Amino acid sequence: MEIYLIRHTSPLVEKGICYGQADLALNLELFESEYDGICAKIPFKTLHFYSSPLQRCLTLAQALSPSVTTDKRLMELNFGDWELENWTDIPAGGLQVWMDDFVNEQVPGGENYTTLYQRSVEFMQELLQQDQESAAIVTHAGNIRSIISWAMDLPLANSFRIKLDYGAVVQLEIHENKQLNQLKSLA
């Protein structure tokens, strides 16, 4: 199956703010140019569109397609007590513990990266059972990194080395035999 993983465009939030499942709007001043860049990278005719239900993804997905299926498993990491806090205001001790092992360490009142990974993989496994040639998934950087890690058998701890700008499009070819999977483009 041909999969297009699309990161939402720039959200309307100040730099330095921690956000995951906070339901942020898109920055409409940047939306048109970022949207045009996405449209240039994906074919529309055979795609089924899926989206995180958070408005920064759903708004983009609905601009790309009149028919979008939402799924909560495509939501970003739940940053719990840290949601919408400035990163510099988060207690340094707790933040460092999480940063030292973000894969396994749970954010206070939130989740760890392994939980996000598991729900992203569960979504992908169900998607692959459907009779579709291609799909587009509008989601968040954490989910995209998780899906790439799963598809390419990469360690989760290394997934944050994958740079994903707002509006990034990742093209994967995914097969039942994971050894045939290919990362076709990252732009």
Image (cartoon, rainbow, N blue to C red):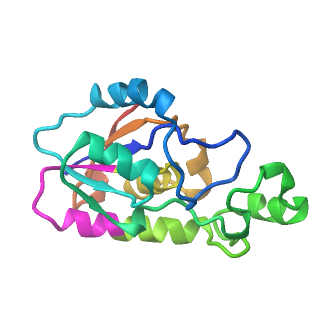
Q: Which residues are magenta?
A: 123-137
Where does the image place residue 71, in percent across and percent down from the top left?
34, 66
Is 42 positioned to the left or the right of 102 in the image? left
Which quarter of the figure has residue 168? top left
Left or right of 158 in this view: 62 = left
Residue at image coords 60%, 47%: 160
Query: Magenta includes 141?
Result: no
Q: Is residue 152 left or right of residue 160?
A: left
41 or 80: nearer the eye? 80
> What percent of the width, then of the height, locates residue 45?
10, 39
Question: Residue reaching furthest bottom?
Answer: 109
Residue drawn where x is 70% and y is 39% of the image: 15
Q: Position of residue 177 (x, y in %)?
A: 24, 60
Name the one closer to the observer, 65 or 132.
Answer: 65
Image height of 152 relative to 83, above or below: above
Give the position of the C terminus as an image quadrant.
Answer: top left
Q: Residue at x 81, y 60 (%)?
A: 95
The reply to whether residue 56 is visible in this rendering is yes
- Residue 47 rendering spot, x and y as whole percentages: 17, 46
Q: Is residue 139 visible?
A: no
Q: Quadrant of residue 35?
A: top left
